[in-house]
Amino acid sequence: MASTPPSLQGGPDEQRGQELQLALLRVDSSTQRGDAVKAPVGHPERLGLPSSALRLPGRGSPRRSEKLLVKCWTRGLAGVLRLWPTRWSGSRATLHVLIPVGLLAFLAWSWRWTTEDAFIYFRVAENFVQGHGPVFNIGERVEAYTSPLWLVALVVPRGLLPGLSIEWIAVVGGLLLSILGLFAAVRGALRLHKARPSAAFTLPLGGVVIASVPAMWDYATSGLETSLVFAWLGLVFWGLVAVADSTRTQDSPAKANPDPDRRKGRARHDASAIALAIGIGLGPLVRPDLAIFAGGFLVTLWWITRSSRAFGSLLLLGAASAIPLAYQIFRMGYFGTLLPNTALAKEASAVFWGRGLDYLEDLSSSYLLWVPIPLLVGFAVFFVRDRLRASDGKSVVLAAAPIACALVHILYVVRLGGDYMHGRMLLPSLFGLLLPLAVVRVGTFRSASALLVVIASWSIVCVTSLRAPAQPPDDPGALVVYDQRRRYADNADRPEWQNPVELTDYERLSDVRTGRGLALRAAKGPPAMLMVYGKRLRAVQSEGSRPLRPRQDLPVDVVAYVGAVGRRGVAAGPGVHLVDRPGLADPVGSRLRLNPIRGFKPGHEKNLPLAWVEARFAEPTRDGAAPSLAVAAARHSLSCEPLSEIVAATSAPLTFQRFSRNVALAVRTHGFRLPPDPIAAEREICRVPSARPEVDRHRSGSG
């Protein structure tokens, strides 16, 4: 006589596990009779598996291995169901956060480092803390940084705790911001997919994809603003989902009566929406190209709050635009530009589709992103369809808005031609694309297992094997893009150089050594104009082969004409004025006109000729020797408008009148560009007839 099974105890998850154990006992007792097992609730047959897979063979036909296979398969399923619960509370839901966040934290810390461009931020931050303002060179107001908020994130702890290394502030702070961004993205996705109660399995697949891409590890601690980008995207998305849930509560029938509790809840909801609008407005101050996401997120916030009144819409718009508008006025008056100087130097509005497509292909092919991304985007399509059928328009908008913004951002990056840093410009696009997919909720065991197997297999291969090129391509006609961190770490011959963070970790590089030499010259004198020739410093000489001296009205005694200015700038210190050829920190170099035949190193296609440096900074020779034709043409060009106004906007004493003039000048000269050749610039700017003889190309620096 068969015994009656005991009643099931515990919550839904525990009851389902007990049902599976009872089913396993029935499998054992039914094997000898060849009966078909009736599937209990939670059994694979109820989860979409074919019923033929559950029928056991007769007494004489089965092999022992088949019986063992059925047992193992059923017990394995029970373990999966316990791991991925259907309910959304308790410690088990924390597992969905810990897996991707823990993976990113471990891998990013293992790859900690600081890139060359991060030291540009460090030099500006040090000048700011020392009272010189947010400038790269003392006495010249140039916005050599891209992210004002990242500069603030460096300046505040550096000013409050001067004993801390600014490199470690950037690395540790960047790692924490990256972790925060992914944590917020996962929590937001969990909350978004909570609106789909019919699905049974919850998997953090999008978060795992984000954490598995090595480029994400690079820029989680690179010292650049990319980690702040991740934090902003994740927090804003989480906030949007939370505000949408709040509107559902306010719109529920239970809250239909205008009682005091409803009015208080409505006030809290409005305050949350305004606070979120302020956070959304900070996007362009994190990176200018995040204006794409900020615009999409602001429209999403307006839609989900159902602010039909004109006053409410204007209030959201005003809250979002107040801080960016205030900084924009400061930028125009202080720096005399509409955009950061780095955007002018890199020509952020230029078009180079072919190179941009190569940049996109470099990221996607390096990590085989065409494997997980289509699967997850396809799931997003099914999610949107399911929510449309349920008349849940808010969930549809919350899922579609980040994906749409990410696609537009990809289009923008491809249009401008990408970057020479592997993956850096496209990482915000990847992160935004996977925001609503950081966690997915699947309805059947078959679908869940297929997604889990494919993405887990891809993740293992990506983490262990897939890497971007560590060296620039040998083909001069190919796009110059590579993994900067790997290029340095692969050539390091000491274990501590595998994770270069501080300037001392880069001591073996020539730019640090030449920077130390510049600092020594500034400390001991005499005043000099120097240039980097190969890996050494060389004096800038006049036509009579005499060393030139900088002008006496300059705040420093050493002027150096160099290429890279990041590590070299920090090593040289504030006592050296650095003029960089690409124009990232120079008001004239950033205004050079691009060559119609574009180069293949994005963002570094401009090359300021030496004649412009001599014309701006060199003291006239005492022996009365005439300058070269190129230097004379450059000096004449610097005295003609609008170039003379641009130089005065950055170097003249800052008064209220100067600030006001700079605001108007920023608008008027935004599109101004000049030829690199000083003689051609003189003819164009000063309208000098073409009567000068041809200048020596080597001396002008335009050959």
Image (spheres, rainbow, N blue to C red):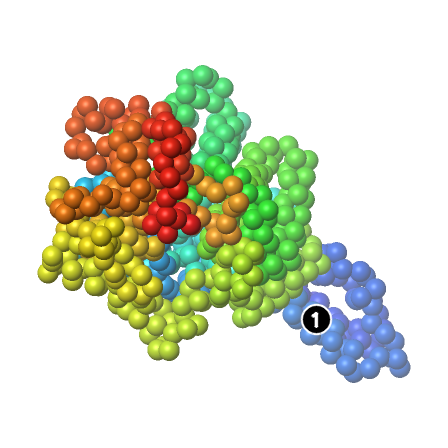
Q: Amino acid at mark 1?
A: Trp
Report the residue at 47% width, 23% height from top.
Answer: 307
Report the residue at 83% width, 64% height from top.
Answer: 52
Which quadrant is the N terminus positioned in? bottom right
How many marks overall?
1
Report the residue at 67% width, 44% height from top.
Answer: 382
Q: Position of residue 160 (x, y in %)?
A: 17, 51
Report the residue at 57% width, 35% height from top.
Answer: 397
Q: Position of residue 273 (x, y in %)?
A: 41, 31
User: On screen, 493 above or below 205?
Assistant: below
Please say whether residue 34 is visible from this viewpoint: yes
Q: Nearer the viewer, residue 433 or 523?
A: 523
374 sits to left or right of 224 = right
Q: Position of residue 206 (x, y in %)?
A: 55, 54
164 sits to left or right of 501 = left
SS state under label 1: helix
359 sits to left or right of 132 = right
Residue under circle 1?
Answer: 73
Q: Residues within 10 Å of mark 1 (few under 14, many from 20)?
A: few
Please say whether residue 142 is visible from this viewpoint: no
Q: Nearer the viewer, residue 217 or 589?
A: 589
